[in-house]
Amino acid sequence: MEYRDYLRLVPKIELHCHIVSTIRAERLIGWANERGVELPSDDPDTLFDYDNIVDFLKVFNAAHEVFRTRDDFATLAYEGVADAVADGNLCYREYFINPDNFAHLGFSYVDVIDGLIEGLRRAEEEWGVGFGIIPAINRGFDLDTALALVESIAANPRPEVVGLGQDDLRADAHESPLDWQAAYDRAHELGIRVSAHVGELPNSQAADVIEAWNVLKLDRVDHGYHIVDDEALVAEARDRRIPFTCTPRSTKFLSGWPLDEKHPIADMLRAGLTVTLATDDQVFFRTTLREEFEHVGLGMGFGPDTIERIVLDSVEATWAQEPAKARMRRDFRRQLLSLRTALVSSSEA
């Protein structure tokens, strides 16, 4: 077995996936043309051509405009799982969704969430891929909207909804995660787990990551790459076992970092931080989860020991219930042992 095959076949968990970005390019362009939604281009080679987060978000937000029925959300969800299973052994995934992005189209919180659950449940029945949904605060809206989202989660309990996130950017293109502290305080009162995008942008600092972790009482950090700018804070993050959901390909698009051994994610892994791998915005960054593992295993030069650590750390970082985690631990260890044996046998041959 070649190492590239090993990277394709290892069991994978993805904890940083914006579900709208799993839409097939032909589906997005087709729906846009049918429904009178103007995209920057109807050619995938140019539609997804950008090199900064602001231009990316213009296309990402435009993609939300193509949805018309609850069934559209089910179709999106089902097809996204089908593609990921075929490409690289996806076993479990947690999805970000911004329900407020669809309100002006007439969709309620329940419309969006239940449509996604329908498609994801169908995919789980066919391929066994577990899932969780994380409604996320859109930082382009105000605090009242964020607080209302938290109340919607509480008023419409679904076991598939596993936490609260925050993404996008403020109007001034800053992260400013602490602006949403009141919404996080309310989430904690309700027993809702929380994460936040922080430490991703060029103007981010290591202290921003730890401050968001402490003040917002996070359960996970999304991105967090600039933690490596401060050795003392790296040590603190390692000691506190802060889980980071990292997305290699998107960093090349948005920060210009080469996907090699000098990448901040490589520094995070060498420092012993808890790292998981994800696509972020799969179609929009022209990537797959398989390729993200290749970026780390081949581009950054990490061997199977590190890949196995990522896989097993990802199980612990999920917000799945403990029985589901126990099944994944057991099944993943079995798969990893079989794959490692095949990889060693191939190298000896």
Image: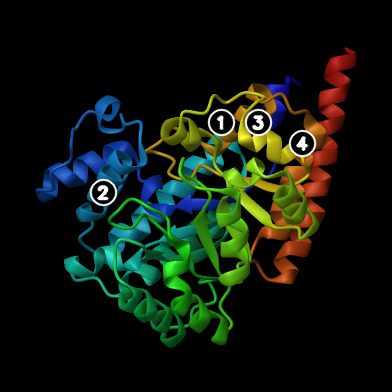
C-alpha separation, residue under disc 1 versus residue under disc 3:
9 Å
C-alpha separation, residue under disc 3 versus residue under disc 2:
29 Å
C-alpha separation, residue under disc 3 versus residue under disc 4:
12 Å
Kindly identify which residue carries mark 3: 296
Q: Residue at x 60, y 28 (%)?
A: 295
Q: Amino acid at mark 4?
A: Arg
Kindly identify which residue carries mark 1: 291
Q: Of callouts 4 and 1, which one flags the residue occurring earlier in the amino acid sequence?
A: 4
277 versus 263 height, above or below: below
User: On the image, which quarter does residue 210 sit in?
Assistant: bottom right
Mark 1 in CB contact with mark 3 (< 8 angstroms): no
Q: Is residue 259 visible?
A: yes
Q: Nearer the viewer, mark 4 or mark 2?
A: 4
Q: Residue at x 71, y 23 (%)?
A: 301
Name the quadrant of the N terminus. Answer: top right
Kindly identify which residue carries mark 2: 63
Q: Amino acid at mark 3?
A: Val
C-alpha separation, residue under disc 2 versus residue under disc 1:
23 Å
Q: Nearer the viewer, mark 1 or mark 3?
A: 3
Q: Secondary structure at mark 1?
A: helix
Q: Residue at x 34, y 74 (%)?
A: 143
Q: Secondary structure at mark 3?
A: helix
- The coloring applied to the image is rainbow
Q: Of callouts 3 and 2, which one flags the residue occurring earlier in the amino acid sequence?
A: 2
Q: Position of residue 332 (x, y in %)?
A: 77, 48
Q: Secondary structure at mark 2?
A: helix
Q: Amino acid at mark 2?
A: Ala
Q: Nearer the viewer, residue 44 or 339?
A: 44
Q: Amino acid at mark 1?
A: Glu
